[in-house]
Amino acid sequence: EVQLVESGGGLVQPGRSLRLSCTASGFTFGDYPMSWVRQAPGKGLEWVGFIRSKPFGGTTEYAASVKGRFTISRDDSKSIAYLQMNSLKTEDTAVYYCTRRGGIAALDYWGQGTLVTVSS
Amino acid sequence: EIVMTQSPATLSVSPGERATLSCRASQSVSSNLAWYQQKPGQAPRLLIYGASTRATGIPARFSGSGSGTEFTLTISSLQSEDFAVYYCQQYNNWPITFGQGTRLEIK
């Protein structure tokens, strides 16, 4: 059974940093690209970023709203994807979901999400 | 950036009736369009990908159609568990973008 479990969320002050982790199981993690999607309280879904699998270079793409502040990485030996968030702003407050981009290119599995609150 | 526009924002339908949700892209996304369902307090779930292919385990009452810029999600006979928020998403171009969602509520 495919499972994605996010961790690392919490309350953080504006301007500070936070790193989220997504621990995967039930599939060959290194074969799949991974994405992060966020959802501000009461709002819709916003794509944050994406990391390709290592055979495709392990390169990344980001939304304009986070580019230069957020970094996605992966450790295939541990089946973990990371979202490093720097220079956090109040508008980054959201539930952050880790997702798998399936072979069909859509986001076929989602974690339960972790809440990040940016507030002083 | 491709803007995805969903309509209506809220749709009120009685159980057993058909629901039709629309999604329009600001430029062609070919058939690289997915639909997701989200219930309160839960993560989204993939329903449809490639504009018309049901994801694993999705009931046949869910169907998707369209290509280019106009897409439709149809739920043929609404069950109580179908009342939720539905999002379309294009994955044809970076950045990936979602529609703002359609809330399907019980009439």
Image (tube, coloured by chain):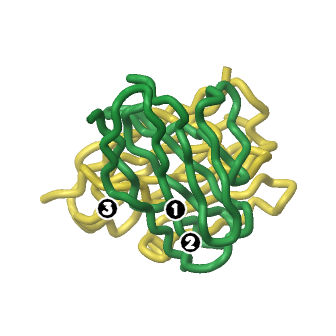
Chain colours: A yellow, B green
In front here: A73 or A56?
A56
Residue situated furthest top in the rendering: A1
x and y, in percent, of residue B5 in the image: 45, 68
The answer to whether dots 3 and 2 both sit on one chain is no
Secondary structure beneath label 1: strand
The type of residue carrying mark 3 is Asp
Label 3, label 2: how far apart the Cα atoms are = 26 Å
User: Up-down: is B78 above or below B31?
Assistant: above
Q: Nearer the viewer, mark 3 or mark 2?
A: 2
In percent of the image, x 35 and y 38: which residue is there? B13
Q: Chain of mark 1?
A: B
Contact between labelled residues 2 and 1, with CB atoms less than 8 Å apart: yes
Q: Amino acid at mark 2?
A: Ala
Which residue position holds label 3?
A: A92
B75 vs A112, nearest the viewer: B75
Q: Residue furthest left?
A: A120
- Horizontally, residue B2 falls left or right of residue B100, namely right
Q: Nearer the viewer, mark 1 or mark 3?
A: 1
Pinpoint residue B99: horizontal percent, then vertical percent: 46, 62
- Seen as rendered, the residue at the extreme front is B17
Q: Amino acid at mark 1?
A: Cys
Residue bearing mark 1: B23
Residue A7 shows up from this direction: no
**Which of the 4 image quadrants contains residue A76?**
top right
Q: What's the distance in space between the residues labelled 1 and 3, CA to CA? A: 26 Å
Identified at 55% across, 78% down, the residue is B26
Return the mark for residue A75. Answer: none
